[in-house]
Image (spheres, rainbow, N blue to C red):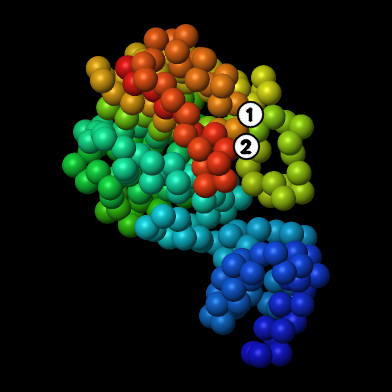
Amino acid sequence: MKLTNEIIKKSWQDIYGCSYDEGLNFLLDWWETSDIPIKDLLEKISQRYPVQYIIGEWPFFDGNYLLDENVLIPRPETEQLIEIIKSFAVNPKSILDLGTGSGCIAIELSKIFPEAKVVGIDKSESALSIAKKNNLQAENKVVFKCSNWFDSVDEKFDLIISNPPYLPKEMMSQDLEFEPKLALFADDNGMECFKEIIIKARTYMNIDSWIFFEHLPAQAAKLDELLQKEGFLETSKISDYNGKYRYTYGRT
C-alpha cells in the first residue's frame, strides 16, 4: 500500500505540483478502501479528472455531497454565501434555491432554518437525481422540482438564493472541462441568467423578503444596478475572503 501511495502521489504531483495537497490527501484516504484499478486511477489523474468526481463525493459546509459530472463541484465561495445568510438578520419561513445542482445550498439552508419550507429548482433531471440522493441527509426535507427558473413555481418565498451559470463562454479552461457546461456558462458576458431571474423574481417573493446571488467580482456593479432597476431595496455587495465583491443581495 505504501508503494502504491507513492506512485499515486508522484502521478498527482506531476500534474498539479505541490499546490493542491488537500485533494491529494482526500484521494489517498479514499484509495485505501477503493476497488478502482490503479491503472484507471492514474489515467484519471493524468487527464486532470477532478478528484471530487473520482471519489464521487465531497464535503461542503456541514454535509457531505454525492457528485458526478451532472453537477458542479461545490466551491468554498458558496460555503461563504451560506455563512453570510446564516449570519444575516433573516428568519425565512420559505426558501427557493434557483439552479440547485447537487442540492448542497438548499440542503444546508434546510438545516440552518429547520422550520422553513425549502424548494430547489433545476432544469437538469440528471442534476436533480443527484440532489434527491443528497436530500437523504436532510431527511428528504427539501422539495426538488424540474423547472427552467420560475416556470414551474407557483408560490412566494421569503428568501431566494441563486448561484446560477455566470461565466462568460470565453472563460472555458482545462480546469472546467469535466463540469456541466449548462451550469457554468451564460450568454451576455455571463449576465443572461441574472437578468432572467431578476426580471421575474419579485412576482415570487413576499413583502420584506430577500434575494442573494453569487457571481464574478466583475459583475457586481451591473447586478446591483439590475436589482435597483427592478425595484429592490437595500441592495448591497459583499466581499469574499479575498476581498473581492462576490455576493449581491436586495430586499423587496
Image side of residue 240 versus residue 175, left or right = left
Q: Are marks 2 and 1 in contact (CB under 8 Å)?
A: no
Front in this rendered view, residue 192 or 232: 232
Using a 10 Å C-alpha cutoff, classify the residue at mark 2 as few (fewer than 14 neighbours), some (14 to 19) or many (20 or more).
Answer: many
The residue most toward the bottom is: 2
Residue type at tag 2: Leu
Front in this rendered view, residue 231 or 60: 231
Residue that appears at 70% across and 59% down: 49
Using a 10 Å C-alpha cutoff, classify the residue at mark 1 as few (fewer than 14 neighbours), some (14 to 19) or many (20 or more).
Answer: few
Q: Which residue is mark 2?
A: 184
**Camera-nearest label, 2 or 1:** 1
Residue that appears at 70% across and 64% down: 19
CA gap between label 2 and label 1 equals: 16 Å
Image side of residue 196 versus residue 160, left or right = right
User: Taking the image as drawn, is residue 176 in sight?
Assistant: yes
Q: Earlier in the sequence, mark 2 or mark 1?
A: 2
Q: Quadrant of the N terminus?
A: bottom right
Q: Which residue is mark 1?
A: 218
* x then y, percent, for residue 73: 56, 50
